[in-house]
Image (cartoon, rainbow, N blue to C red):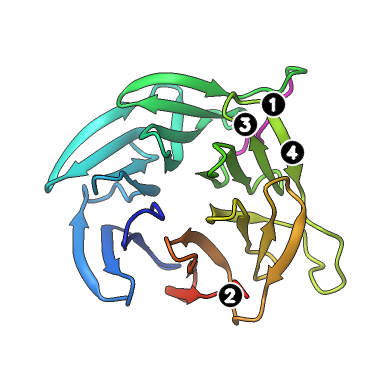
Amino acid sequence: ASRRQRQMCIRDRTSRERTADIKCFNTQGVLQKTIKTKPGNAPNDIAVYSDGALVYSELKTKTVYKVKNDQTEEIIRLQGWRPTQLCVTSSGDLLVTMVSDDNTQSKVVRYSGSTVKQTIQFDDEGQPLYSGTDYYKYITENRNLDICVADYGAGAVVVVNQAGKLRFRYTGLPSSTKNKPFKPIGITTDSQNRILTSDCNNDCIHVLDVNGQFLRYIDNCNLKLPTGLCVDNDDSLFVCEFFRGNMKRIRYLK
């Protein structure tokens, strides 16, 4: 969910099953509301607009839905592509990561409502920016308007500027303590343009500066398979632990 919201919406997904519920909690972890989606079509990812409207993607139907005032409408339906992860930008656009039906191509598409405004897929040499697999590609926008993607399949954080030009690619650091391959599965940014990405293989979070330079790990919170990340207005970090079914709030700034 957007860091601009004072409440958190999360998908209800455990290691045993995927449900059709989206649950909204306050920052103290108290359930405020449950949004029921279509049975059998579990939401793949969610995002929140500044007015509180919720959007969620479904792989099975290749559709993005918007929920406002308990009313659900279809805003995007794809052909040949499946929507994976979502991000609402500061300007109110919607960024959607998507993968082709044959799992050979991935791209980021910017929408204004249901209208395509921008497609980001290749670098200046015509090479793909993102892996073609259907693995997770979580996405966020930094305050300098960079578009940051945690590309699990590539083992990289890929950052482009607002025009879609590659700025840098971060693939982790050699480390004696973090000796498994870097696998980013969630991403967020904070008020200082730092980029935080969860490394599910090494049970930690990497903190980068705006130019992709490694700053530190967050690895002293007994994290286990951290996935979704969100930073609120006070720079508190919220982390979902996939198999435990937990959400942790971490004050990571010194």
**Quarter of the view holding residue 167:** top right
Q: Are marks 3 and 1 in contact (CB under 8 Å)?
A: no
Per the rendered image, the range of residues in magenta is 127-133
Q: Nearer the viewer, mark 4 or mark 2?
A: 4
Q: Amino acid at mark 2?
A: Lys
> Where does label 2 land, which residue?
224
Q: Is residue 132 magenta?
A: yes
As rendered, which of 154 and 144 lies closer to the eye?
A: 144
> Where does label 1 land, which residue?
128
> Where does label 3 land, which residue?
161
Report how far apart the C-alphas of labels 2 and 1 lie in the structure: 32 Å
Q: Give residue 47's position: percent from left, percent from top.
A: 36, 47
Query: Of the residues under marks 1 and 4, which one precedes in the sequence?
Result: 1
Main SS class of the magenta portion in the image: loop
Query: Of the residues under marks 4 and 2, which one precedes in the sequence?
Result: 4
Report how far apart the C-alphas of labels 1 and 4 lie in the structure: 14 Å
Residue 239 in sight from this viewpoint: no
> Where does label 4 land, which residue?
168
Q: Find numbered disc 4 in the image and state the secondary structure of the residue it sits on.
A: strand
Q: Give residue 203's position: percent from left, percent from top.
A: 65, 71
Q: Give residue 224's position: percent from left, percent from top.
A: 58, 75
Q: Nearer the viewer, mark 3 or mark 1?
A: 3
Q: Residues within 10 Å of mark 3 (few under 14, many from 20)?
A: some
Q: Using the image, determine if residue 208 lies above or below residue 234.
A: above
Q: Find numbered disc 3 in the image and state the secondary structure of the residue it sits on.
A: loop
Q: Amino acid at mark 1?
A: Pro
Give the residue at x 35% y 60%.
10
Q: Give residue 160's position: percent from left, percent from top.
A: 64, 33
Query: Of the residues under marks 2 and 1, which one precedes in the sequence?
Result: 1
If the image is split into quadrants, where does the N terminus sit? bottom left
